[in-house]
Structures are given as C-alpha cells and as structure tokens.
Image (cartoon, rainbow, N blue to C red):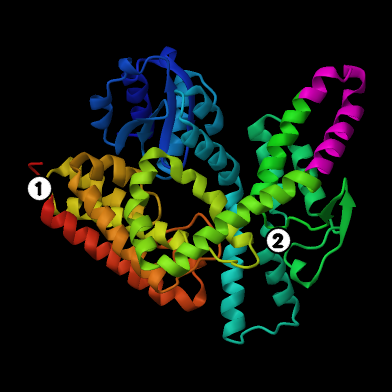
Amino acid sequence: MSEKDTAKKILELIGGKSNIASAAHCATRLRLVLNDTELADTSAIKELELVKGVFTNSGQYQIIIGSGIVNRVFSALAELAGITEASTAEVAEQGAKQNPFQALARTLSNVFVPIIPAIVASGLCMGLLGFLRTNELIATDSIWYLILDMVSSSAFIILPILIGFVGAKIFGGTPILGATLGGVLTHPALTNAWTVASGFQSTELFGMEVGLVGYQGTVFPMLIATWFMCKVEKQVRKWVPNSLDVILSPFIILVVTGFISLVAIGPAGRMLGDGISTLLLYLYENVGVLAGLLFGGTYSAIVITGIHHSFHAIEAGLLGDPNIGVNFLLPIWSMANVAQGAACLAVGLKFKNVKTKALAMPSGISALFGITEAAIFGINLRYVKPFFAGLAGGAVGGAYVVFAKVGMTAVGLTGIPGIAIVQNNSVIHYLIGFALAFAVAFVGAFITTSEKD
C-alpha cells in the first residue's frame, strides 16, 4: 500500500476530514486532535500495512508510521483533507487537559526540541576535538583547532539566546525580544559564567549584593526570565497606544525584564539549576549503580507518560554547568531504548505471524537508533512481557554505564547514533552496556513471550 493510499484509508477510518480539529507530525507519528475520537476505527487503522501502532496520549490521537515515511503520509493526508500542519505545540494545546507534570514536561519539550540540533552539533564537534587532541592529531595553536573549539562551545555559550528565542514563541511573546533578553544575560560586561571561580564584580542594590555574573550555558534562569518577559509583554502591549507600540513597548519590556532578570530571576534560577544538578551528581556519585538500575529500569515507563520530555532541560543544565560539563543521564536513557528494541526484535524472530514480524523487525531496529515509539506501543506493550523484559534490560544496562562512569557530550542521540557523542574514554564501556541491555531484554522477551499471549 502506497503512502497516498495509506493516508486515504486513515482519513476514512478516523471519520473524515470534518473530524480533524488539528494535525501535525513528529519524527515517527501522525499527531491528530479529533473532534470525536469515538468515530475513529482504531482496530482497522492498526491493520494498515504502513501503520505500526495507534495510541491516545494527552488528547492526541497518535498513529505510528515510522521515521521518514511519516512525512510523506502526512503530506498526502494534508492534501486529501485540505488542511495545513499545525505546530506540535498547538496540537498539544488543543488536546485534552494535562496534569501539571505533563503540562510542564510538554512545555520544556516544545522549548528544547528545536534547540537539540545545535546542541548535538556542538557535542559531536566536542567529541571529535577531544579525540584529535587526545591522540595528538591536531596542534592546539592551529586554525583548525580554533574553529573546532568555537563550534564545540558555541551552542552552550549562546544557549540563553536560543532558549529566549524559542521560549518566547512557546510562551506567546516576541521571539526577537526573547533572544535579546538572552543577549542581556550573556553580555560581555558580565563575568563569564565559566570563569566565575577566578573572581567577579558585584554591586549593591537596596542593601543587597548583586553579582555581575553572566548566564552562559544555563537553562533555568533563562526559561523563567523568558516566561516572565512574555507576561510583561502582554500587559505592556495592552496599555501602550498603537502609535507608540513599535518604539515604546520593546523598550519597556527589555528594561523591566532585563533589570528584574539580573537582580532576581537570574540568581534564583541559577540556584534552582545548581540544586538539581548537585542532587543528581550526588546520587550519581554516591548511589551509583542503584541509581542507574532504577533510572534505566523505569525510563521506558516514564516515556509512556510523556514526562521524559522534561529531561532535555536537565541534561542541558548538566552540560552547561562548569563543575559537571557532561551528560551522565543520556547513557542511561540510551540503554533503556536499546533494551526495548532488543525485546521487540525477539518478538519478531520468535513469532511466525507475518504481520507481527513485519512490524516488529523494523520497529526493533528503529529503537536501536533511538526511535522507540513503534517498538514500545506497536509491539512490546501489546504483548506486555516484552515491555517488562525491556525494563529489565534497561536496568542492567543503566547500572553498568553508571558503574563505568559513561558520559556524553550532547543531548538527543541514543542507541547506535549515541556512540558519536560518547566521551572518548567511555566508548568501550558504552558498548558493553549496550550489549548487556540488549542481551537481557532479548533473552527475557524470547523466553517469556508466546504467540498465544
């Protein structure tokens, strides 16, 4: 069945174009908000050749298609239904009410997903630079070293600017003002956040000492400041006359939010970020293997709730913290993803049903490359036991990578692609954790799962 035929059948089975309130797609799924979910024939949709699974989450009717092909199916669906694509943020807002944790997780996801490519690029360059430097393949005074060093640190230096730009979009403000506010918090007049240990200037305000320290690489100060800026902007634009809006509003917004961010929001946000990082580092260094066992064993279950989207902000905070500078959470998540892929592959190899094999094999391989939705929702949760086998594999793999102190230099890449951002001295341990997670999950699913289940 072609992509266009699949789109035509999906449109028919969800109740026609009149039943679509909003539509978007992500890397693997059609994400639809339907006027009446009861009109959708979910069982029939699942039987379509290109469909790998269907589930409802946060009011969104999500149809798993797969990486790459989902773009073509959505384009055909949009053409047939006469609709335009909404942003995933808009689709999320139109879905059912979320609890506060899900709402926060979704907001953080909407802010950080667009930024991930920049962080991944910097992380890959950081890994390459570390390899070249360790093996003395590049001179530290060469122009190539300088360029690679600039690329590897650039996304973290201007992270507040990136957060300000994207965050303002999400919070309903003006993106360019959000970016400018990020520029205020990383201005050269402020002591660089990564060199603050060598001393910094401060000034007194209302009897309080205010440190003139920048926020390069920080996450929570800029997130809170951007949210506050958007609140201020909405109020300012209500009472400033239209004739003066383009001149007066930006001035008031930036002066007010810049001042309050530097003297109050910034320090409070830094304390929050430092507190989270310090707690995680304490657990990592003192609880160690048990923390890896727990996080690795529960991550896939957290994925089902959608709360895992909030982890991008925490991981970025770890990378931007000059006292940490490494992502020690992502290797754990990676082991969980690999384990779910292994369990899915076990089902594909053991089962004789042609439809199940055709779904399980590509879904399992996709999970090994970090895209787990098709494996989790299409196969593992359907048969239950593979999902729990995947949890066990993730626990074992997670425990090992924590024990071996495996770290990564970026966010967003797991499984096989994750090898590219693993610290040079950790690659072999990453592969060992990969093998352990895969083996435990594969064997567990193969032994416990029956086609009669």
Judging depth in this view, the residue of 240 and 453 nearest the camera is: 240
Left or right: where 261 falls relative to 384: right
Which residue of the protein is positioned furthest toward the front in this rendering? Answer: 207
Q: Is residue 259 positioned above or below 132 on the image?
A: above
What residue sits 70% from the left and 61% below the top?
A: 154
- Mark 2 or 1 closer to N-term? 2
Q: Which mark is residue 154?
A: 2
**Quadrant in which residue 343 is drawn:** bottom left
Residue 151 magenta: no
Other-residue count near label 1 (Cα within 10 Å), few / some / many at <14 / 14–19 / ≥20:
some
Do the residues bearing badges 2 and 1 touch, measured as CB atoms within 8 Å?
no
On the rendered image, what quadrant is the N terminus found in? top left
As displayed, is residue 326 above or below residue 344? below
Farthest-out residue, top = 18
Left or right of residue 362, residue 100 in this image: right
> Is residue 213 toward the left or the right of residue 301 in the image?
right
Compared with residue 301, is residue 425 higher up or lower down, i.e. above or below? below
> In 3D space, how far apart are the residues under numbered discs 2 and 1 (Cα atoms)?
51 Å
- Number of marks in the image? 2
**Residue 294 percent coordinates (x, y):** 34, 57
Which amino acid, mark 2? Ser
Query: Where does the image place residue 289, in percent across and percent down from the top left?
Result: 36, 67
Residue 7: name its quadrant: top left
Q: Quadrant of residue 2?
A: top left
Residue at the spot 74% in from the left edge and 74% down from the top edge: 146
Name the residue carrying label 1. 450
